[in-house]
Amino acid sequence: MARTAGSGIRPTIRMVAAEAGVSTATVSYVMSGRRGEGGPGVSDITVERVRAAAERLGYRPNQAARAIRTGRTNTVILSLTMLSDPWSLSVIEAVQKAAAPLGITPLILGDADWVKVLQSHDADAVFVDAVTPEQRKPLEGLAARGTTLVVFDEQLEAAGFDVIRSVAGPGCTLAVEHLLAGHRKVGCVVPVRGERPPAGRRYEAYTSALAAAGIDLNEDYVGAFDGTTAGAYAATMRLLGRDDRPTALYATTDYAAVSAINAAQRLGLTVGRDVDIIGVGNAIEGERMSPSLSTVGPVDFFDRVARLLLKRAVDGGTQVPEVLDFPWQLFVRESAPHRSAANRLY
Amino acid sequence: MARTAGSGIRPTIRMVAAEAGVSTATVSYVMSGRRGEGGPGVSDITVERVRAAAERLGYRPNQAARAIRTGRTNTVILSLTMLSDPWSLSVIEAVQKAAAPLGITPLILGDADWVKVLQSHDADAVFVDAVTPEQRKPLEGLAARGTTLVVFDEQLEAAGFDVIRSVAGPGCTLAVEHLLAGHRKVGCVVPVRGERPPAGRRYEAYTSALAAAGIDLNEDYVGAFDGTTAGAYAATMRLLGRDDRPTALYATTDYAAVSAINAAQRLGLTVGRDVDIIGVGNAIEGERMSPSLSTVGPVDFFDRVARLLLKRAVDGGTQVPEVLDFPWQLFVRESAPHRSAANRLY
DNA sequence: CTGTTAGCGCGTTCAA
DNA sequence: TTGAACGCGCTAACAG
């Protein structure tokens, strides 16, 4: 009396075989579309009988069982730390578009504890958007055990997995320089971990570009926040609420820039006129919003990431891991337009 | 020469058994923590040996293989149509919090074509946030075949699955009446499918509340949009850009309300003073933003949904499906404060 | 050329 | 504490 738990019974390949009066092997060949080429041939009439039986029963191959045998799950996992970030949505959108024609399902993991999950759950490829120092070891362990990984990180070396390294430094300098062309009072909105002072390449681009322009760093113009959108909003309110408020803001991520724009508007300022704001990342949403977001970022980033991920998913871990560099570019849009000498704000 | 595809080899239960010098059965009992209580007893010394061997090899049970035997995947799927909606993020947040202590992993499906995915991929329970008419049939098919479903829908009858029916009608009326207490020029921001005119309970609440207040429906005050955040933004710009602009806006979803607030601020209006804006849904983010979002919605909605989903995931489809009704409530916050007769805007 | 048999690969679980 | 069967779909080798 074999039966799975629960009330409903899911049709198995054996039921279909019985219904069609053939063997399970034949059903398998028909369902996976692998008749002819290489495998044994199945007559058209039999194919039709099997198809009809499967249809009648509403049969769908059990992906879990299939995965055990083939090692393929027809699934990619996207581990995304900050789902509210338009950057994450851009990744999702690009991957979904690329995965659909391949019959691959993207599943999103919004959990910060992705290491544990990936140790038990298999996928044909996994995209990881952030790696803390403590996660580096287990990450390499995953790769060693055969998990196909594509990791977004600016520091990591490829150690059995692909690394997407969109080197932010030079691009971020472009952003700050763009603001410095029309402003002297340039503030910065930057996330920090814990109580530590701001750090990282994106922030260094700010300090060094200021220095290169002969401007002293004003700590009152640095709005550190906790990494949440609400925090970015509050930090911007503090910066722009000052009497000697900055006339331009450099936000080290696009989502911080979006929050900054909202905060500025809340204060009655017109972004792109009273204050210029630029972000970092070139998320797709930046183009669509109003005012559209000036930003720096890699060209064609999301589509290329999606293509790599799916190539890996299809090929398996066969290929040699790469470090993928992306050239960055300045995208001048409404939130921080070009300023000629004539319309400088300072 | 048995070996899985790819270069890395994943440790199996057999390797652990060999390493520890015991049978696979023993390893299984140890790993699933099912020794003692009900299950067979395993001596402490053996447990230690097995644990050490598993640790050395970095063994993790293969969830796919486990699923075949047990019928449980330790996974719940959240099918969410609009990931940028704070409502979706609220669902995710609540489910993640509730799932973590149970060892259950929430996976998010951002694909509109969830039916196909669910037909092949199993989960202990699935949350679905929107059902089109064409999806109703396949939905019932899924339920009949044993998929444990929790469906969010205001119309559907329970047909083998739970229905979360947060009856919006009366609650939405509360929202419109709240605005009508201080305004006569109340606009509406509402998504529409295709070219059809606005419809649905949330919109009817608007027209009937207006009628009850003796106010004629002004079609120029109805901002229909395409369902995207950018569309809601544009619709609001049109409404508030008019000379005789409405002094209050009723948005039929929270994400539309958020876009409306951004648009209003873009126009230099102070929300909660120059214009009042109210949403629908009571997404968690509404409390955190600034100005905080006035809204109507079910009380404690997300946590209760999460609890139900996980109860189903744990119990399997054992229980009798329910229709869950949620009482709605008005949440007065900054974006549409209380207005006494003294500070009416009209 | 067409179809079947038999056994694989997981982790689980019952009878011994 | 274990051997062996079990559940699933896949597939090499075989039979007609």
Image (cartoon, coloured by chain):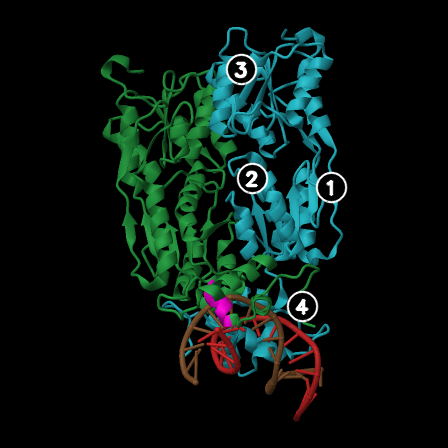
Chain colours: A cyan, B green, C brown, D red
Q: Do labels 1 and 3 share a chain?
A: yes
Lower sequence index among marks 1 and 3: 3
Residue A74 visible in the displayed image: no
Residue A156, image x and y in percent? 68, 40
Indicate the quadrant where residue A298 lies.
Answer: top right
Q: Are marks 2 and 3 on the same chain?
A: yes
Amino acid type at image mark 1: Leu
Residue ID at (69%, 7%): A342
Q: Residue B3 carries which label?
A: 4
Residue for badge 3: A270
| Image position of B215 (left or right of B254) | left
Q: Pointers 4 and 2 in contact (CB under 8 A)?
A: no
The residue at which mark 2 appears reads as: A89
Q: Is residue A156 above or below residue A212?
A: below
Where residue A17 appears, as percent x and y from the top left, is 53, 79
Q: Distance between the residues labelled 2 and 3?
A: 27 Å
Amino acid type at image mark 4: Arg
Between B15 and A78, the one nearer to me in the picture: B15
- Please tell me whether mark 2 or mark 3 is closer to you in this view: 2
Q: Give the range drawn in magenta.
A: B25-30
Q: Say if mark 2 contacts mark 3, CB within 8 Å.
A: no
Same chain for labels 1 and 4? Say yes or no.
no
A208 left or right of B131 in image: right
The disc labelled 2 sits on which kind of residue? Answer: Leu
- For the residues beneath circles 2 and 1, the answer to whether they share a chain is yes
Q: Mark 4 lies on which chain?
A: B
Mark 1 or mark 3, which is nearer to you?
1
